[in-house]
């Protein structure tokens, strides 16, 4: 039974994951090497808990979140360790080396990687059978879907344990049957992003208009009708007819569009730098975070039939 969880890394995802797991009655140790990251995560707990309240997710036990900058303290007695550090194999491998001698043979180690194959990551830990991918979607305290991915050496019972654990929290596990880069969610997302960046770069459409097109067109539909069900709704004959000419014209570049590289070189990275595709003031960033959380909560309640 999973009762004690350690989250290693309090970046973008860590605070929301900690809040949601604690709401499920679990004892959570939240670790980061940077004091500033811990302070930020602590400050975010109240906001995350308010969102969970608005979703009507009641606490199922005396869960708690304890913050620490000592990794040994964080993983001590943990039934599940969730690694949530930056998307570089060498950084993740160092974390696995640190925790390897600190956890028991029964402890499951999961990675929240966005797309590094689990087989590559589990090569850096001494008990790969107990290693699994557990990819949350951002923001993790609002979006209930979590991908579960086995590497080549992951034991089937490890996958089953994590799948059942996710279900026990009232969340939605999706088992990815093959360990492909990006898994499923990000492969679909990045295919869309490649196309919209290409369209903007070619001057076909402005960023504001492509956002409106996607959010109020396919995005609106996909929130209710999944893509495979959408094929049936549209008709496979229609999909076949359009694909015969459209597929040949879709973006299929294997590198990253120059527009993205140019913005990175200029230091315009998005929200984190105050400018990316769009420009943001600190006040606007705070406003956007609250507005997006409110809308995601409203959509989820409608999809669940609770509003």
Image (spheres, rainbow, N blue to C red):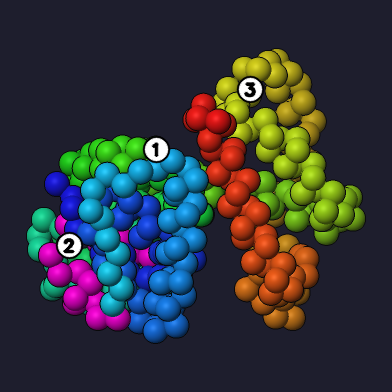
287 relative to 242 in the view: left or right: left
Residue 72: give x, y in percent of width and height. Answer: 19, 77
Q: What number is the disc on residue 231?
A: 3
Residue positioned 44% across, 49% down in the render: 52
Looking at the rendering, the stretch of residues picked out in magenta corresponds to: 69-84
Q: Is residue 187 above or below residue 271?
A: above
Secondary structure of the residue carrying numbered label 2: loop
Q: Is residue 84 visible?
A: yes
* Residue situated in front as seen by the camera: 178 or 165: 165
138 relative to 116 in the view: left or right: right
Residue 147: give x, y in percent of width and height. Answer: 40, 45
Q: Residues within 10 Å of mark 2 (few under 14, many from 20)?
A: many
For the image, the number of numbered tags is 3
* Residue situated in front as seen by the camera: 208 or 66: 66
Image quadrant holding the C terminus, namely top right
Question: Which residue is tagged 2?
Answer: 78
Q: Is residue 165 above or below residue 246?
A: below
Earlier residue among tags 3 and 1: 1
Residue 22: give x, y in percent of width and height. Answer: 30, 55
């Amino acid at each position: 039974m999973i009762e004690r969880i350690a989250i290693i890394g309090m970046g973008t995802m860590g605070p929301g994951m900690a809040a949601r797991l604690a709401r499920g009655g679990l004892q959570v140790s939240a670790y980061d090497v940077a004091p500033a990251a811990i302070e930020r995560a602590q400050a975010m707990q109240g906001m995350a808990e308010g969102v969970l309240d608005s979703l009507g997710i009641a606490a199922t036990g005396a869960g708690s979140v304890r913050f620490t900058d000592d990794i040994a303290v964080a993983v001590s007695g943990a039934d599940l360790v969730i690694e949530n550090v930056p998307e570089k194999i060498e950084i993740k491998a160092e974390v696995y080396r640190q925790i390897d001698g600190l956890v028991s043979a029964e402890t499951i180690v999961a990675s929240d990687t966005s797309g590094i194959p689990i087989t590559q990551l589990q090569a850096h830990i001494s008990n790969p059978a107990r290693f699994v991918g557990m990819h949350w979607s951002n923001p993790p305290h609002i979006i209930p879907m979590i991908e579960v991915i086995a590497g080549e050496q992951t034991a089937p019972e490890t996958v089953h344990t994590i799948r059942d654990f996710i279900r026990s929290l009232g969340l939605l596990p999706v088992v990815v049957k093959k360990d492909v880069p990006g898994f499923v969610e990000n492969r679909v997302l990045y295919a869309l992003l490649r196309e919209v960046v290409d369209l903007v770069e070619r001057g076909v459409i402005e960023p504001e208009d492509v956002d409106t097109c996607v959010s109020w067109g396919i995005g609106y539909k996909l929130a209710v009708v999944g893509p495979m069900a959408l094929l049936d709704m549209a008709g496979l004959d229609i999909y076949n007819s359009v694909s015969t000419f459209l597929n040949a014209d879709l973006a299929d570049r294997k590198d990253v569009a120059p527009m993205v590289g140019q913005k990175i070189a200029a230091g315009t990275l998005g929200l984190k730098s105050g400018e990316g595709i769009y420009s943001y003031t600190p006040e606007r960033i705070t406003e956007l975070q609250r507005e997006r959380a409110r809308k995601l909560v409203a959509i989820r309640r409608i999809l669940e039939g609770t509003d």
